[in-house]
Image (cartoon, helix red, strand yellow):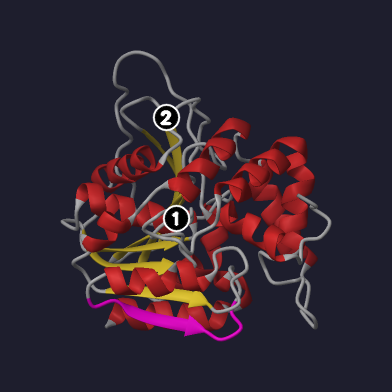
Amino acid sequence: MDLKNVESRRDVLLGAGLLAGAALTSKAAGAETPRAKAPTGGNNGNTLTTKDGTQIYYKDWGTGQPIVFSHGWPLTADAWEAQMFFLASNGYRCIAHDRRGHGRSSQPWNGNEMDTYADDLSELFEALDLKNAVMIGHSTGGGEVARFIGRHGTRRVAKAVLMGAVPPIMLKTPAYPGGLPMDVFDGFRKAYLADRSQFFLDVASGPFFGFNRPGAKVSQGLINSWWRQGMMSGHKNAYDCIKAFSETDFTEDLKRFDVPTLIVHGDDDQIVPIANSALLSAKLVKNATLKIYKGGTHSLGDTSKDQLNADLLAFVKA
């Protein structure tokens, strides 16, 4: 794969996994570790210890109905700060965690796959006793939300949002012939291992934010922030997550959605192309509302921030 040619279709599609958020946590051997107590609202950061001893970092801002955010690969809870600040300022409790293997969470050797990601999030729901929550997932985080509902149901969930999300599946399969072939993700892994720092820079400065488009207003700050978050991820954790976000089939999970669901996607998403993701998911989720952002990038939370914030507020208030 030619990393310098980030505008080529192949490299753009290779970026497809970037959103898929990897999880991070370091597993302690032995007996179950006690969980953290539920915090009061407004804390800057807290830590939950899961049953397998993994430390999960999370932010907990504001008070009111809980809104729980799941980030993309290879980022952190910081990717959601613009939405968290806006919604917490409008009377909601906003919670976002660093998935195991990412950010400030620990970096376990094992458990870097969707079932464990969803189970970690379920433990966080239980520890904080979250009820009537709105779940919002971006890219890989959208897969995490889908698998959470598939495995744990909607007893604690009122609504769901999938934004630039990877479901139903990124990999080309007999059921999804429009997906990406395996050699795309093999090339992605090869590039990651060769020089992940430079690769992160190339993706952030190109297809992720749409900065490779003619006339795009490039933000070096966004590029630097994306690179910083990516480099905080565990090397093996983020590597394993490539398989998690590309090969996991969320079809049956999406069929189990029984709460109001908003599916948001940019029609110029170069990382997770809309035709093989949102357009298919909208057919699998009962009574889903599909909102397409014309010219929208993969990172709507940054490049279409005001529009997304307004749409999220309207959806959670409805």
Furthest residue in direction right, as rendered: 4
For the question of whether residue 45 can be seen, the reply is: no
The residue tagged 1 is: 141
| Label 1: which secondary element | helix
Q: Which residue is mark 2?
A: 54
What type is the residue that disc 2 sits on? Thr
The percent position of residue 213, horizontal first and vertical second, equals: 75, 77
Q: Is residue 295 magenta?
A: yes
> Which image quarter: residue 14?
bottom right
Q: Is residue 113 above or below residue 298?
A: above
How many numbered marks, from 0 up? 2
Assess disc 2: are there few (<14), some (14-19) or many (≥20) residues with their C-alpha within 10 Å of its C-alpha: many
Q: Nearer the viewer, mark 1 or mark 2?
A: 1
Relative to the observer, which residue lies in front, 316 or 278?
278
Label 1, label 2: how far apart the Cα atoms are: 19 Å
Residue 83 at x, y percent in the picture: 49, 69
Height in image: 186 above or below 13?
Answer: above
Residue at horizontal 64%, vertical 56%?
15
The image quadrant that residue 96 belongs to is bottom left
Residue 305 point in image, percent of width and height: 57, 77
Which residue shows up at 56% across the image and 86% down it?
294
Magenta highlight range:
287-296
In this picture, is 202 found above or below 211? Answer: above
Question: Residue 91 in the image: x percent, y percent?
Answer: 36, 73
* Mark 1 Cα shell of 10 Å, populated few (<14), some (14-19), many (≥20): many
Asked if residue 180 is among those painted magenta in the image, a careful observer would answer no
Work out whether 283 lies above or below 272.
below
- Amino acid carrying mark 1 in the image: Gly
